Image (cartoon, coloured by chain):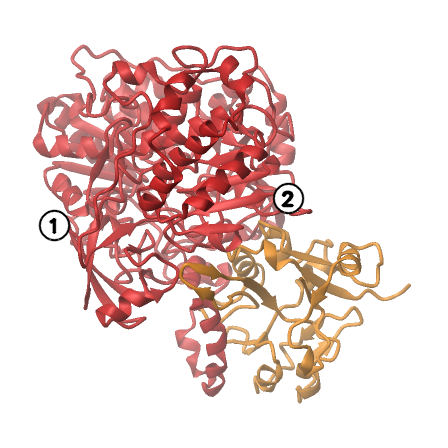
Amino acid sequence: MKNKRYAMVLDTRRCIDCKACTVACKAENHVPLGRDNYRNWVTQEELRGSYPRLGQSFTPGQCMHCGNSPCDHICPTRATGVNPDGIVTVDYDKCIGCKYCMTACPYNARYFNEEKGAVDKCTFCAHRIYGDGRSPACAETCPTKVRVFGDLNDPDSEVSRLLASRPYRVEQPDKGTKPFLFYLM
Amino acid sequence: MSRQSEGKLSRRRFLGLSSCALAAVAVGSQVKVLSALAQSGALSVPVAQGERNVLTSCGMCVNKCGVIARVKDGIIRKLDPNPHFIKSRAMLCARGNAGIKTVYDPDRLKYPLIRVGERGEGKWRRAGWEEALNLVAGKMNGIAETYGRAGMMFASTEGTFQDHFFNQLAECFGSPNTVRHPSLCLSSNIQGFSATFGTNPTPDVKYADYIIMSGANRAEAIITPDTIDFLKGEGGRRKVVYLDPRFTKTAAKADEWYPIRPGTDMAFVLALIQVIVTEELYDKAFVSERTVGFDKLVPHVRQYSPEWAEEECDIPASDIRRIAREFAAAAPRAVYYQGRRSSFMADDTQLRRAMAILCAILGSWDVPGAMVPNGKIPLGAHDYLPPWYDDIPPRLDKGGAVYLSEKDGSWKVFRDRVLEGKPYPVKGMMVYKQNVIASVPNRAKTMKMLEQMEFICTIDICMSDMAWYSDVVLPEATYLERQDPLESLAGIVPVVVWRQPVIEAMFESKPCLWIMQELARKLGGEVPDSFNFTMEEAIHHQVKKNPQILEDLKTKGVYYEKTEPIYGSTSGKRLKTKSGLIEIYSAKYEENGLDPLPVYRAPETTPANRYRLVVGRNAYFTHATTANNAYLHDLMPENSLWLNRAEAARLGLADGQMVRVRSSVGEERLRLEATDKIRPDTVYMAHGFGVLSGGQSLIRGRGGCDAALIEDHLEPISGNVAMHHTFVEVLPA
């Protein structure tokens, strides 16, 4: 059987910056309290224009589960790894907290979890996917259903259909990281 | 600009820190919170019970979304959305997800407390329930003895599903003086729409092609399913025009945003009507068959041209005219979204009348995409017979508004009369989860009202400002620890919801029903007679005629009969108005000396060097109740004063500096946010900060309290407060 390739497709036009994803993630993954500790986020982009002609976008983000992950390449202890389905993982026992990966990640997707004594980041809620098959907590709870999670190797999955039918972009393509978070345009 | 992105960028700074920062990091997991509490002897750690998924409903705001609580070993690990909960399109917002921290909050009220210092000094003594309730009952009976039973007032939140029992106690105790939330919120909305349609309908957002939204920031003040549905769906057919003095997140999502001058919305609506009437764009058949008074509307609106409205609203006449034509072309799939809260200006009921009239002349009524009357799934009632007392006077605030709600009253009028002591004294206060001090405008006046109270008891889950200034504080179990009665939620897709306990109530907290029953017993006389029932019996009475409801709640967590709105329920029937028709012209209002058609009165001009203070919501907090929640606190640790960037520069004030904000009734200190996102003549601050309570450790001393600044103006038709009549000065701190 062909491997899965997990990905997330985001329709940011539907994002209202309610931060349900951020809180759901903190609760689901026991992310320590504090404003520097989070696995996912919503960026309020700079205001466009000036009063009274204004515009603003909100961009949710998290680990991009890159196909060419700088964090994986730089990790000196192999604490960071990549599963066959594309999920980039951290083995907390192997992590020595050197934080090289935090510097290497162009998306600033990693933080140091003081409770774990290790670097932590989004796993697409792997424990849910591999457990009872539920979607990541952020995608499931999203009020306006900005995030769609699924398997890109399945041509009938919603993520495949969205990418086949709609134009999209990835963040910082110039970095060559081959991210698997796709933003619909 | 973006607080969250600032936080995001800043965490690279963290690279320089060593792990010794551990001590400063707050614990994240519920397990650790519990262990910490167990170590302090506050409670015992639950014994292992395996994993369970419990279907219940959220209690963090008014929406009551369906929740699946994931419980492991007696600890709630996660709250997930219930996929069957159609009303909220199967979602949970930030607050819903953060509910877990409301349960495992170290600041929670744990035991009954009796005040030992001065009020507000924060000196308490832990008491047992027996002692605390004996004290409360003794004080209540003492006040009844001295001042009469009406001398006790009962202030309550609504929508906890157990507030009915609190109000039942008021009734059985014999006081007419229940004061509730609507006169700080939606009472003028209900009044204005009901006077026109006989009911307050719901805009059918999902199927509307054109939505004009003013006074409702639906992307941030979450009301389900509208918050989800107002966004463009597939195809992007829907148009949203949004009026707000602030560039909110709704503005960011709207097709067109107009920073309207606060308090002039009625001018905009009347000008739309004028264009539609003049250009004969209205639904002639609908108007002649279903409405009364159109003939009087025609000459009335002649004066309200788009050119005139441009001067009032700061919205170009050409846009007003175009919007009117587009709106009429989209009708009947066109709604003027009235929102929920309507406590803005003293003419708010008449503004709501104007909105309703606009929809009525376009035939936007009871068809897909229009204003649709709510349905409600019938539930049986657990009946009780309150004792009869001969000497009960009318409500204290009777006559204080033209159409005063008998159960809700008018906070503004009520408080004034308590202070006057007329027509009779009110000297005792029972409060159920209403944060009166932080919510009723003019906090200084509220404090004066409290000073003259001989006794105050507050039931809550946290040390709100109201609890902090009480004599006895009683801890209620949170929404995740209670069995609640069923609640039928009215709407265009009505549902029935309930709550079952996810975990056992922690500490010594108790559900409201238990507290009311025990208190009733101690009050004695005939008060306890009607409290002799169990929750199971109450629920049994609710579903006697339709046991399927309970079955569905147990298996799906929600009961509904239809998944799509029901249209046409009023077709061929009399409406609940005097004429039985949609009343464009209100003969009832005329009889009561009110304007039978909405008459525009310009708001007072903003004085030089003053700003109009406006209120508004964000998606992280519910009223003044959730700012101390640890997860939500991470999203927004304090509020700021929004001031237009050019104005801030003119005043020599820098973004981020502390400022003093002064009105005629108070002064607050908070951080300045210099921004383009607000009109130059207007300032804004989020609600729920600037707390007085020492029992809210995360937010004590953070931000400013809007209720301390807002003057208490009255909307005289419904008794609502009018919160946008306050001007403030902004000074460096």
- Of discs 1 and 2, which sits in the foreground? 2
Instruction: Please give the label number shown on residue B237.
Output: 2
On the image, the x and y values in percent for residue B99 come to 47, 50
* Label 2 crowd (10 A; few <14 / some 14-19 / many >=20): few
> Residue B461's quadrant in the figure?
top left
Check the image and report above or below for A89 versus B610: below
Residue B429 appears in view: yes
Check the image and report above or below for B590 versus B267: above
Residue B486 appears in view: no
On the image, the x and y values in percent for residue B512 come to 37, 34
Q: Amino acid at mark 2?
A: Arg
Between B191 and A167, the one lying in front of the other is A167
> Residue B204's quadrant in the figure?
top right
Q: Amino acid at mark 1?
A: Glu
Instruction: Please give the label number shown on residue A119.
Output: none
On the image, the x and y values in percent for residue B86 come to 62, 37
**CA distance separating discs 1 and 2:** 61 Å
Tell me, what hue is chain A? orange
Total marks shown come to 2
Please name the residue shown 29% across and 48% down the image: B464
* Label 1 crowd (10 A; few <14 / some 14-19 / many >=20): few
Is B40 placed left or right of B552 in the picture?
left
Between B724 and A109, the one lying in front of the other is B724
Is B720 placed left or right of B567 in the picture?
left
Pinpoint the chain carrying mark 1: B
Locate the C terminus of chain B and report the quarter of the image it occupies. bottom left
Tell me, what hue is chain B? red
Residue picked out by circle 1 = B118
Question: Answer yes or no: do the residues labelled 1 and 2 have beta carbons within 8 Å?
Answer: no
On the image, the x and y values in percent for residue B629 come to 40, 55
Please, what secondary structure does the residue beneath circle 1 have? loop
